[in-house]
């Protein structure tokens, strides 16, 4: 569980004032009571969206959600009054719920498009077509004949036929064959599925044909994939930022696209259930901000709501829609970590991968 200090700091930074928090939370609560037209009942904001017909169970869920929001708003008013020490555990959990529902959502993706964002993220809507283009180039790393896993993490198309993911993802099926050379651990094979969306069994898998390399310092691996899947050809690679975006990194809006999975070892189960609604392993859009950077140490931090399956996700600048980082880990209400790719352009493995730097 996050500490009170961590939650209060996040509430100040993300929610702003109590009035703003109240407006966003109540809009989110109303939206959560409406069935989503594309899913017959699931709303991207809702912990568990009610069906059109009200029942005692769905009314109880709605009442619990409303009470949690009211607890959070009471805590927000105490923060404004300088009375943080009076925030109860109920109030803290209410604050967390508001942050997750309105400020750092994990929005489900269907048919290559994202569901309705919460009020705080309405600026995603005019950018829908550009975000859709990014969504198409992010996939789930599938593995066959692995004794423990069917899939391992996220990857994105960053070169003409190269996918970037994390080292700790690739090492589940790769082994060194010689210095600087890698091969599959027999009998395992891998593929990248650029679909794996909620409510659909449709797949778009491109076979991993080669392990280009696995970095010995950064949590980064490069995979080569087949250029076709049946009659479908690979699209153009995502643009990767050749320099830091803008004058200031901290506070810059970003988004992550990936496949969050249950991650109870590192994250508190209760907020995980609230934001992900017990729906894991499918593609989501997760907006947030850059929260810190130590570029000289080849690391940036962000506060998007990610889980273990996001390993290998691209961190995308919301203004330019270029990849600025490779997500590789984090912890709820603390910080998430990413490699700032523009800082390693001269790295031999990055040059070998022929990333689409712009």
Image (cartoon, grey):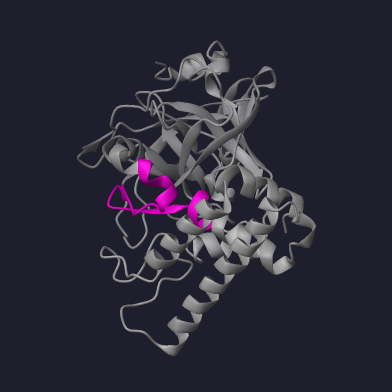
Q: Residue at x 40, y 52 (%)?
A: 119
Q: Is residue 224 magenta?
A: no
Which of 226 and 306 lies nearest the eye of the viewer?
A: 306
Residue 181, quarter of the rendered image: top right
| Vertical position of residue 318 compared to residue 198: above or below | above
* Image coordinates for residue 95, horizontal then vertical, percent: 62, 59
Which residues are the magenta region? 100-123
Which of 142 and 184 lies nearest the eye of the viewer?
A: 142
* Image coordinates for residue 136, horizontal then vertical, percent: 32, 40
Which of 159 and 209 lies nearest the eye of the viewer?
A: 159
Q: Residue furthest right?
A: 85
- In this view of the protein, can residue 162 be seen by the observer? yes
* Image coordinates for residue 23, horizontal then vertical, percent: 46, 57
Residue 112 appears left or right of 322: left
- In this view of the protein, can residue 172 be seen by the observer? no
Q: Residue furthest bottom?
A: 56
Which of 338 and 67 lies nearest the eye of the viewer?
A: 67
Q: Is residue 101 magenta?
A: yes
Q: Residue furthest top?
A: 346
Q: Quadrant of the C terminus?
A: top left
* Image coordinates for residue 115, horizontal then vertical, percent: 34, 54
Q: Residue at x 62, y 49 (%)?
A: 11
Q: Quadrant of the N terminus?
A: bottom right
Q: Residue at x 72, y 49 (%)?
A: 6
Q: How many marks?
A: 0
Q: Residue furthest front?
A: 81
| Vertical position of residue 164 compared to residue 197: above or below | above
């Amino acid at each position: 569980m996050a500490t009170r200090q961590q939650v209060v700091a996040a509430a100040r930074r993300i929610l702003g004032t109590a009035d703003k928090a109240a407006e966003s939370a109540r809009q989110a609560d109303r939206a959560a009571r409406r069935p989503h037209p594309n899913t017959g009942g699931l709303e991207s904001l809702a912990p568990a969206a009610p069906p059109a017909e009200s029942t005692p169970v769905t009314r109880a869920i709605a009442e619990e959600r409303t009470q949690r929001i009211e607890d959070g708003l009471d805590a927000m008013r105490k923060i404004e009054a300088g009375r943080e020490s009076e925030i109860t555990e109920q109030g803290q959990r209410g604050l967390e719920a508001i942050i997750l529902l309105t400020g750092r959502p994990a929005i489900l993706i269907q048919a290559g498009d994202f569901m309705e964002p919460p009020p705080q993220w309405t600026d995603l809507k005019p950018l829908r077509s550009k975000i859709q283009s990014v969504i198409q180039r992010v996939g789930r790393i599938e593995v066959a004949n692995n004794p423990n896993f069917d899939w391992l993490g996220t990857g994105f198309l960053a070169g003409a036929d190269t996918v970037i993911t994390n080292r700790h993802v690739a090492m589940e099926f790769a082994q060194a064959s010689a210095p600087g050379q890698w091969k599959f651990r027999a009998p395992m094979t891998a593929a990248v599925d650029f679909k794996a969306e909620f409510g659909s069994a449709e797949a778009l898998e491109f076979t991993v044909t080669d392990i280009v390399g696995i970095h010995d310092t950064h949590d980064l691996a490069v995979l080569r994939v087949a250029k076709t899947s049946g009659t479908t050809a690979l699209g153009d690679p995502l643009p990767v930022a050749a320099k830091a975006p803008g004058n200031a990194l901290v506070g810059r809006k970003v988004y992550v696209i990936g496949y969050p999975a249950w991650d109870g070892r590192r994250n508190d189960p209760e907020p995980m259930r609230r934001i992900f609604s017990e729906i894991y392993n499918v593609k989501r859009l997760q907006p947030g901000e850059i929260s810190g950077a130590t570029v000289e140490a080849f690391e940036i931090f962000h506060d998007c709501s990610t889980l273990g399956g996001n390993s290998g996700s691209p961190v995308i600048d919301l203004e330019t829609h270029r990849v600025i980082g490779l997500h590789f880990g984090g912890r709820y209400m603390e910080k998430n970590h990413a490699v700032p790719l523009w800082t390693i352009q001269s790295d031999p493995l990055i040059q070998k991968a022929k990333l689409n730097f712009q």
